[in-house]
Image: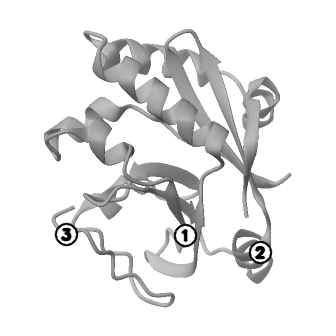
Amino acid sequence: MQGDILNLSVGEKLNLGGLEQNLVSGDGAVFELMGLSGGFMLIISLDNPTDEEIEKVRENNIKIGFLNDDNYLLPMFQVSEDLTFETFFDPNVYLSRVKDPLQILKRSSMIVTMLVDSSNTEIKTIRYSSLPTEAYDELIKASENALNTPKYSETYNKWTNKLQKLSLSQLWELTEYKGKIS
């Protein structure tokens, strides 16, 4: 992203300077660096979300957990029993966009969570919070490891590909709970 300020509004189309193309059609989530000011975005995309799903994302505490295997970290978010998402976290992806991704990650633990209708990219709800301290600290530690490990992205992708055989509920069972986003 070019600027530090996000100008996002409920009812408008998601526009992140091309980054919104990371949203896959259908249901899923993306956990991204928010911008040069630091902080994170959790973009939950659902195809034609119901009013009940919108309400859950807007009001429920969102549990965060990590599936941690040696050097790799897979963040998972659970809005409710029927809304659980795995997200990929490879800080090396940011190297093409920012000069020092680790310093940007350390600037803020703020997280902007939004629900986007993947059928038309309309923003359905937005909420602002902070990541739980334990989760934030572990993200920083994992980032330092990733940025200092040769060929990390390649091996991380192989690791996450192996996890694809597990269901979301199985992955959630394997995660270590790190707190909730209120």
Residue designated by label 1? 114
Amino acid carrying mark 3 in the image: Gly
Residue drawn at x 25%, y 58% is: 36
What x and y, as percent, mark residue 15? 31, 74
Residue drawn at x 61%, y 75% is: 48
The C terminus, quarter of image: bottom right
Residue designated by label 3? 3
Q: Nearer the viewer, residue 182 or 41?
A: 182
Residue drawn at x 55%, y 70% is: 114
The N terminus, quarter of image: bottom left
Residue drawn at x 48%, y 49% is: 31
Q: Is residue 91 left or right of residue 66?
A: left
Provide the secondary structure element on which disc 2 rests.
Answer: helix
Mark 2 vs 3, N-terminal side: 3
Provide the secondary structure element on which disc 1 rests.
Answer: strand
Q: Residues within 10 Å of mark 2 (few under 14, many from 20)?
A: few
Residue designated by label 2? 59
Q: Quadrant of residue 168?
A: top right
What x and y, as percent, mark residue 102? 31, 36
Q: Nearer the viewer, residue 7 or 179?
A: 179
Q: CA distance from mark 2 to mark 3?
A: 29 Å
Q: Nearer the viewer, mark 3 or mark 1?
A: 3
Q: Nearer the viewer, mark 2 or mark 3?
A: 3
Amino acid carrying mark 1 in the image: Met
